[in-house]
Structure formats: C-alpha cells, structure tokens
Amino acid sequence: MTLDDCAAVAEVRVRGWRFAYAGLMPRAYLDAMSADRDAERRRELFGRSEEYVAERAGRVIGWGCHGPCRDTDVPPGEGELYALYVDPAQLSTGVGRALLETCLAGSLAAGRPVMRLWVVEGNARARRFYERAGFVADGAREPYEVGGASVPELRYRRGPAAT
C-alpha cells in the first residue's frame, strides 16, 4: 500500500463495514460513515503498520494490515491482524484469502509466528472465513462500543501452540 491508496482503501473499508455489520451495528452509525473522513484517518495512521492492498484491473478491491499484538494479556512477540476488508462485490473470489496469507507471511517474516485478531461475534461470515484459515477462538471476549451500542467481539489465534 502507498499513501496514494488511502482514498481507495477508505472506500473499500466503508463499503465493507456497511455490508459486514448491517444488522449488527446501528444503521445510523453505518450510514454516517464517510470515506473522506476515513481516508484522512488512513493517511494519519499510514506507516504505523504493515499494510497491503489487493488490486484488480488497477482498482483497489481489498486491504489488510497487521503489526505487533496490542493486547497485554498475550505473550510478547505475537502479531495481530488489525483489519481485513474486501469490496463486497469481490467476496468469495479469493481476494480475502490472498490478503490474509500475505499478512500472515509478513507477520512471520517480522518474527511473529502467532497472529491474533478480533472479530464481531455476530459476524458469522467473517468467523467462518477465519476458522477455515486455521484461526481458533482463544476465549477472550470484549464489548466494542459503536454508535452507542455494545457489540461483542471475540479474539482468535493462529500459530504454533504456546510452550
């Protein structure tokens, strides 16, 4: 990903949220999301994590990013998948899997063979996707506040067993 990709990534991210979280998060919150505001946020955060885009015919159709795990209750040196979004029109085409594999390889190359991620509990499609990719829920559950609603998230883990 380059800085020039931020606007396209924001479009994918906003469309992804509206699709994935319909019925799970307040509609007013999803409707109020702005790709322009999100692009500014992507620019502010650029360079703080490893970020990748998937393109088809020169158009950004997916985005993933990862880095060190931010959770304090896991062993040091683990990675975290911070985000993975695919344009809803591109779901089930292999784009998400390719982005996930790229993030996993990048985390491993950075010396982080274990990767964690958080997923909205009610997002059955995403949970199936991650479970098929070898992630397992690790028992952690936290509320996530969105637009005045509490949306529970579950943490998943993939990698070698702890020693």
Image (cartoon, rainbow, N blue to C red):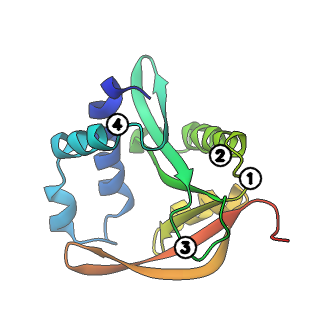
- Within 10 Å of disc 3 (Cα), the crowding (few <14, some 14-19, many 20+) is few
Q: Which residue is mark 1?
A: 113
- Within 10 Å of disc 2 (Cα), the crowding (few <14, some 14-19, many 20+) is many
Q: Position of residue 88 (x, y in %)?
A: 40, 45
Q: Which residue is mark 4?
A: 9
Please identify the quadrant where the N terminus is shown.
top left
Badge 3 element: loop
Q: Amino acid at mark 1?
A: Pro
C-alpha gap between disc 3 and disc 2: 18 Å
C-alpha gap between disc 1 and disc 4: 26 Å
Badge 4 element: helix
- Point out the tag, 3 or 2, that comes first from the N-terminus: 3
- Would you say the residues marked 3 and 1 are in contact, meaning their CB atoms lie under 8 Å apart? no
Q: Which residue is mark 3?
A: 72
- Point out the tag, 3 or 1, that comes first from the N-terminus: 3
Please identify the quadrant where the C terminus is shown.
bottom right
Residue at image point 34% right, 27% down: 3
C-alpha gap between disc 3 and disc 4: 29 Å
In this view, the mark in front (3 or 4): 3
Q: Amino acid at mark 2?
A: Ser
- Within 10 Å of disc 4 (Cα), the crowding (few <14, some 14-19, many 20+) is many
Badge 2 element: helix
Task: Note whether 23 is above or below 117 in the view shown.
Answer: below
Q: Amino acid at mark 3?
A: Thr
Q: Based on the displayed image, in which of its 4 quarters is residue 101 positioned?
A: top right
C-alpha gap between disc 4 and disc 2: 21 Å
Q: Which residue is mark 2?
A: 107
Residue at image point 57% right, 81% down: 140
